[in-house]
Image (cartoon, rainbow, N blue to C red):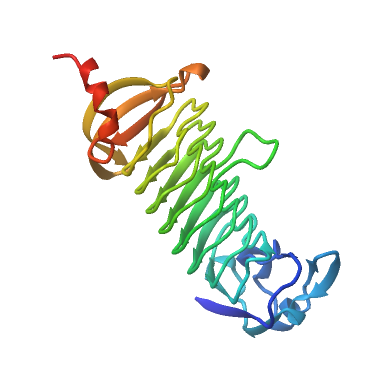
């Protein structure tokens, strides 16, 4: 693997669009060519070397490239846009739209990052050690097809509308989320290790949401089905037991909502509907 290191020179005052920073676009370029690439900083174009100290040199093929970015990148946009191969490692705070339309490869973020992580992604892997904003794996504004494959792992918390219009793939969150987890979900799997603020699976048609923490209440448009001891994500078993609901019935949906029994004693009254 070849390492190309971009270290931020100074704090960013305006948004910087870095959609060209992917192994696909950097393969075969010399370090001097990378340094002279132009990016938008606010409403003006600047060369990459004015923003970053650049070390190393890319290899000829994307799969051989490891791109390392260091510093507070919270004002950046679209790192890894459309990438198909290789690795991007963000050592610091990430920005918005990281991994948008990603088709392969791997992105690792050591700190927190902003909203729209992995939006419209089709394949590949994203791992975040900290917290993430809203719309993880979601569809772009005005679109109705979100994440269609790949895997996202978040070790912290996430915001609202995780997996909005998700079609396929897997999202795992160790912490909790805000409202509307899996809203408009069509397929795929979301596993939440912590608590959800509410309205999980609203307008859901298909797919699976597993909540191992607390959910105040399932939406009234979901039907209680059974208690199940465990469920699966791919080949991995997730142990419960879980209250299992289906819905969203307002959409004639057939999605599945698994809610941990132990963390949700307020839902015990559903057990009276179980057949003896």
> What x and y, as percent, mark residue 153?
43, 55
Question: In percent of the image, x 61 and y 40: which residue is there?
Answer: 139
Q: Quadrant of the C terminus?
A: top left
Vertical arrangement, residue 140 with respect to residue 39, above or below? above
Question: In percent of the image, x 59 and y 58: which residue is there?
Answer: 114
Residue 21 found in image quarter: bottom right
Viewer-nearest residue: 50 or 63 = 50
Q: In the image, is 262 to the left or to the right of 5? A: left
Residue 79 found in image quarter: bottom right
> What x and y, as percent, mark residue 248?
46, 22
Viewer-nearest residue: 229 or 169 = 229
Q: Which residue is outermost to the front?
A: 266
Q: In the image, is 34 to the left or to the right of 209? A: right
Vertical arrangement, residue 153 with respect to residue 235, above or below? below
Q: Which residue is outermost to the left?
A: 276
Viewer-nearest residue: 11 or 69 = 11
Question: In percent of the image, x 67 and y 36: which residue is there?
Answer: 143
Q: In the image, is 165 to the left or to the right of 193? A: right
Question: In percent of the image, x 59 and y 48: which residue is there?
Answer: 119
């Amino acid at each position: 693997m070849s390492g190309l290191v971009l270290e931020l020179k100074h704090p960013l005052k305006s948004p910087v669009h870095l959609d060209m920073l992917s192994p696909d676009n950097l393969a075969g370029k010399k370090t001097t060519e990378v340094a002279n690439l132009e990016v938008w900083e606010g409403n003006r174009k600047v060369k990459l070397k004015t923003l970053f100290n650049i070390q190393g040199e890319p290899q000829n093929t994307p799969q051989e490239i490891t791109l390392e970015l260091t510093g507070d990148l919270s004002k950046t946009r679209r790192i890894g846009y459309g990438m198909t191969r290789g690795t991007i490692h963000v050592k610091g705070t990430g920005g918005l739209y990281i991994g948008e339309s990603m088709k392969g490869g791997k992105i690792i973020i050591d700190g927190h990052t902003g909203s729209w992580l992995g939006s419209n992604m089709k394949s590949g892997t994203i791992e975040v050690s900290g917290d993430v904003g809203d719309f993880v794996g979601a569809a772009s504004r005005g679109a109705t097809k979100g994440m269609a494959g790949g895997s996202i792992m978040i070790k912290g918390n996430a915001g609202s509308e995780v997996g909005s219009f998700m079609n396929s793939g897997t999202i795992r969150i160790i912490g909790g989320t805000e409202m509307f987890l899996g809203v408009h979900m069509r397929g795929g799997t979301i596993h939440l290790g912590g608590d959800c603020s509410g309205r999980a699976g609203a307008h859901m048609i298909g797919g699976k949401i597993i909540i191992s923490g607390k959910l105040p209440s399932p939406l009234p448009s979901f039907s209680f089905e059974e208690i199940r001891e465990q469920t699966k994500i791919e080949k991995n078993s997730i142990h419960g037991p879980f209250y299992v609901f289906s819905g969203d019935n307002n959409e004639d949906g057939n999605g599945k909502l698994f809610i941990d029994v132990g963390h949700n004693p307020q839902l015990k009254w559903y057990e009276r509907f179980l057949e003896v």
